[in-house]
Amino acid sequence: MASGQESKEELEARARQGETVIPGGTGGKSVEAQQHLAEGRSKGGQTRREQLGHEGYQELGTKGGQTRRDQLGAEGYSEMGRKGGLSTTEQSGEERAQEQGINIDESKFRTRT
């Protein structure tokens, strides 16, 4: 989210340019749209958690990670984690790896069929 010093007009301008100014508001072209998107995504997750219960919801997340690891293989999953661990709010993992001279072998990311 932007600092408290930024005006609504500045946030609106950034949102119109495609920048996410509200956490979870990806895809919204206005501050209001981003707020609605973030709220809807949060409510969807809460509803699913209520349906499954706490343990079921945690298990669902674990299964998703295991499935992705199976798709990428152990090496690919590890490389993906390295890249993700380098990312910051200002830079993607790829940008940061290039800046720091860290080699990320994306050929290991290939989904196995």
Image: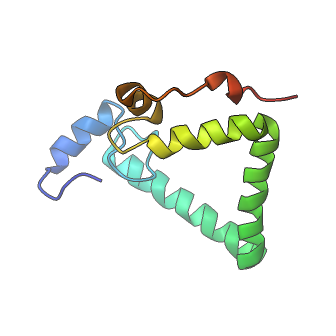
22 displayed left or right of 58 = left
Residue 51 sits in quarter: bottom right
Q: Nearer the viewer, residue 8 or 103?
A: 103
Image spot of residue 57 (x, y percent): 72, 69
Picture layout, residue 32 above or below residue 104: below
Picture layout, residue 38 above or below residue 15: below
Image spot of residue 6 (x, y percent): 14, 50
Image spot of residue 41 (x, y percent): 55, 57
Residue 36 sits in quarter: bottom left
Residue 104 sits in quarter: top right
Q: Nearer the viewer, residue 49 or 65?
A: 65
19 displayed left or right of 49 = left
Image spot of residue 53 (x, y percent): 74, 78
Residue, far top: 107
Name the image quarter holding the C terminus.
Answer: top right
108 displayed left or right of 2 = right
Name the colouring of the figure: rainbow
Please name the residue shown 47% across and 55% down the image.
38
109 displayed left or right of 13 = right
Q: Nearer the viewer, residue 97 or 39?
A: 97
The number of discs equals: 0
Please name the residue shown 69% across and 29% down the image.
109
Please name the residue shown 66% across and 41% down the image.
78
Please name the residue shown 55% across and 41% down the image.
82
